[in-house]
Image (cartoon, rainbow, N blue to C red):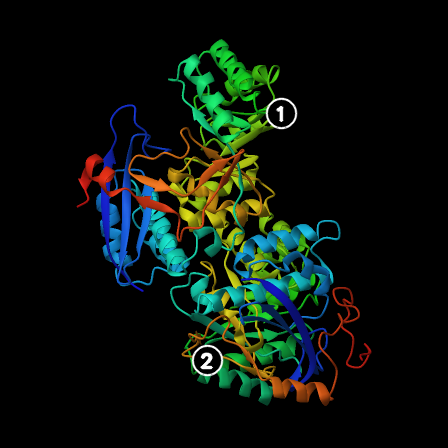
Amino acid sequence: MKVTGVKVTSYACPPGGRAAAGMHANRGCVVELLTDSGLTGIAIGADGAHAQIERLVGELLVGADPRATSGLWQQMTDAQAARQNEGFASTTIAMLDGALWDLKAKANDEPLWKTLGGSRPRANAHGGGIAPTATDYELADRCRMLSRDYGLRGAKLVIGGDEDRDLARLEAMRTALRQGTAVPTLIVDAEQRWAPEEAIRRLRAMERQFDVAWVEGATRSGDIPGLKQISDAIRGAVCIGRDLGTRGEFLPHFDQRSADVIQLDIGAVGITGALELADAAYGFELPVTLAEAPGNIHAHLASVMPYFMSMEVGYPATRWPVFTSDVRIEAGWAIAGDAPGNGLTVDREALKRAATRGGS
Amino acid sequence: MKITGYRVEQYLMKMDRLVGDANLPSGVEMLPGSILYLETDENVTGISLGYGGGIEALFGAIEGADPREVVALWIRMNDWLHKAGNEGAASASLSAIDVALWDIKAKLADEPLWRTLGAREGRVRAYASGLDYCLSDEELFAFYRRMAEQGIDTGKLKVGLDLAADLRRLGIMREALSIASQRPGLMIDANEYWSPKQAVRYVRQLEEHFELIWVEEPARRWDYHGLRLVSQQVKAAVASGENLHNLAQVYPLIANRAVDVINVWTGQSGVTGLRQIAHMAHVHGLPVSMMNAQANYMAHIAAALPNHNMMEVVDPGREHCLKWNNHVEDGFIVLGDAPGFGIEVDEARLKQLQANPPTGRGKFPFPRREGAGRYIVPPAPGEVPWR
């Protein structure tokens, strides 16, 4: 089996709609890696890297056997090392790696989780970040639906603005989640707004009223001593990783113990990179959480990560604008299906309507 | 697709020659062998080489499971060992089962394991390792020359007991390898015979005459202070890890920057376990090196590791009842396309070996030498008794 080419389609959805989760809520990019066997490898990710994707496929992947996921990952990252300053390098490689894994699983006619060596995945899940733009009513409503529709017993709130408003919203989130569990798991994301001292003051004040499982974006992700200082000062865990793209960026956090929870996102580090980093985190006894991903396909990876803890799902968790996913969310768990590959299927009609660049 | 049963065949081999290191320079020629056959309901059998018994204690963790779910099964087996720990015989069993599961996974995909693991090609750079403390100078030269004729330009010599002899032997190894390269790569292995400061004194003296790529096991396997001290005080890199059996045991070496190269092999909790070690090493920018293996089967795993430098190749003859699908060419182990590890067992030959066990001198593995790391006055020949 050989890669023959790639089709890249950018899409944008009308305001109010919802596209790929994560970095670009209403915009995204569909990568379809074509082969001589008729199988197509699919990856959905952030938009903006058309040229890089097409060039990398042309230079390295055309003619290669897509089952060589590890070797091709190595080739792509080596090529990236020479182009450090070009934007989108990490996301480009991450998406192509995802498409290669999809092909590898499809070549075996088995779901991705099985190709990875996983057992039927039943990934513990929590609700995704509730944006500060959501009104208090929307926030409570969203949490009730996460609980009612999916049985989720934990959720993440974006904080960092007005202190009293943060506390009131956290209270609203806890109250809403209590319809499904006596002890909701509360996660907060301060989006790197705070300096370490401010983070410590705000989080300690929060912890007088709430048991917070972990905090993302407690301070800038490059501030290793600052994050360590925060971790030492609060009860909850400090979580980093979502905006890191290379193992070199994760290394100081492992080494200096500046994080207690490692968050991985295949949209940033690829599947190959995520598996590698999860093993390294295991070596450091650090639990791994998986970020919100298009189609919730992180569910495929959970059962091969020795210290997997929980994965994030958005709302609505199973409706996507230009593709479908066979991952379902039930009773607080994300469960990947049995369709070959990563379970993502492109909705041709919808993609045609939403396409802004590329496609055919 | 289900795992239905297993059997273990044990046998004894007489190698073609003696093998020895600083702990037993006179060497042994007998080697126990063990083959685990993991059976499924689809007429595919996974094979795992070179381990002892003890499978029954863990088989319950995988019985009836789909062997393709090998990583999740590794986690389950590791969880089963929660109280006792992934150590000793239990660890060897976990390793053996994991290897056989990967063999099945690749066979079911009808592809060589290197492809299942994601390698671009089934090709691994090799270095020669003589296991050679028991060889005469002529035999030493002949071994490395034979390897050099296959394109291998790097060798690893057993050292540690006699500085003058080791200097002479390093010269012989370099000379023998010189037909493969103008600058043969030279490595040494002390098999934990030294204390850290002994290692520094010894290696520094060798380095007055030879440039060494790495010194292997210059101190005890867990001694991260000692290993780091050696690494800082000699020019050569320090390699270690072959006698540790899981990621948790290797962790202090990596986290404390104690070693520069990590020796990996399937005895470190299987393919899955050694891959965890390699991944953690990779994140730290450390290379790994695969240990020697019967029929070089571990080259499949090495081919897919992003940070693998070179694999140890030996030739004492341990493949008495095996058929395999790889060869050494131009200094590389070249793997074939046979499914799984590409290993087949010659059952008739195995039965013969079991019915008529060969006899010979000594038996692997041998114990640590009396006084290793302690007797700062080197014992004269014969002063330290051996059996």
Mark 1 residue crowding within 10 angstroms, few (<14) / some (14–19) / many (20+)? some
Mark 1, secondary structure of its residue: loop
Quarter occupied by residue A133: top left
Quarter occupied by residue B94: bottom right
In the rendered view, would you say B246 is above or below A333?
A: below
Location of residue A76 in the rendering, given as x and y in whole percent from the top left corner: 34, 53
Instruction: Say if labels 2 and 1 share a chain.
Output: no
Q: Front-most of B355 and A277? A: B355
Q: Front-most of B213 and B48? A: B48
Q: On the rendered image, what quadrant is the C terminus of chain B found in?
A: bottom right
In the rendered view, would you say B22 is above or below A318?
A: below
Location of residue B113 in the rendering, given as x and y in whole percent from the top left corner: 47, 67
Q: Front-most of A198 and A333? A: A333
In the rendered view, would you say A133 is above or below B39?
A: above
Residue at the extreme top: A164
Q: Are marks 2 and 1 in contact (CB under 8 Å)?
A: no
Location of residue A358 in the rendering, given as x and y in whole percent from the top left corner: 18, 43
Q: Residue at label 1?
A: A235
In the image, taking residue B227 as reference, residue A38 lies left or right, namely left
User: At 23% from the left edge and 49% from the top edge, which residue is drawn?
Assistant: A7
Q: Label 1 is found on which chain of the structure?
A: A
Q: Residue at label 2?
A: B327
**Residue A86 seen in the figure:** no
Q: Of the residues shown, which amino acid type is indicated by label 2?
A: His
In the image, taking residue A191 as reference, residue A121 lies left or right, namely right
Which dot marks residue B355? none
**Residue A119 seen in the figure:** yes
Mark 2, secondary structure of its residue: strand
Q: Of the residues shown, which amino acid type is indicated by label 1?
A: Arg
Mark 2 residue crowding within 10 angstroms, few (<14) / some (14–19) / many (20+)? some
User: At 67% from the left edge and 86% from the top edge, which residue is drawn?
Assistant: B351
